[in-house]
Image: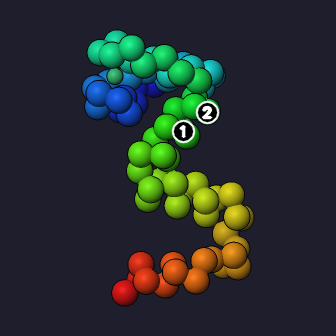
Amino acid sequence: MKIKCPKCKENAEVAMDYSVVKCGSCDLDMSYGEYVKFVAHNQPRYSDILGDYASGGSTEGHTAGSLDEWD
Ligand SMILES: [Zn+2]
């Protein structure tokens, strides 16, 4: 499966079993778990999405400062 390389923004490839992510344009070669962390680290919005999944959709646990984002 083709994905966007988080390093060089070219086409990278995810193995069918999601075991590894490789990019032919740079030396990217990491596990899919590492890839998700890498992307989440570089895209705070994506990290929020993952956080919502992790919390099971509960509205509890939002930080007090999060309301500022809705302004
Ligand atoms: Zn790359």
Q: Please state the horizontal and vertical placement of residue 39, each as a whole percent of the image.
A: 46, 41
Q: Residue drawn 29% across and 15% down?
A: 25
Q: Residue drawn 58% across and 54% down?
A: 50
Q: Residue drawn 68% across and 58% down?
A: 54
Q: Which residue is the site of mark 1?
A: 36
Q: Quadrant of the C terminus?
A: bottom left
Q: Quadrant of the N terminus?
A: top left
Three-letter amino acid code at the position of disc 1? Val
Element type where label 1 sits in the image = helix
Q: In the image, ligand 1 is in what quadrant? A: top left
Kindly report the distance in space between the C-alpha atoms of the residues bearing marks 2 and 1. Answer: 5 Å
Residue neighbourhood size for the residue with mark 1, other residues' Cα within 10 Å, grouped as few (<14), some (14–19), many (≥20): some
Side of 68 where 31 appears, left or right: right
Side of 70 where 37 appears, left or right: right
Residue 24 visible somewhere in the drawing: yes
- What label does residue 33 carry, if any? 2
Element type where label 2 sits in the image = helix
Label tally: 2
Three-letter amino acid code at the position of disc 2? Gly
Residue 16 visible somewhere in the drawing: no
Q: Please state the horizontal and vertical placement of residue 70, each as a whole percent of the image.
A: 41, 83
Query: Of 58 and 16, which appears nearest the observer?
Result: 58
Q: Residue drawn 38% across and 23% down?
A: 12
Q: Please state the horizontal and vertical placement of residue 48, each as a whole percent of the image.
A: 52, 61
Q: Please state the horizontal and vertical placement of residue 44, each as a whole percent of the image.
A: 44, 56
Are dots 2 and 1 in contact, CB under 8 Å?
yes
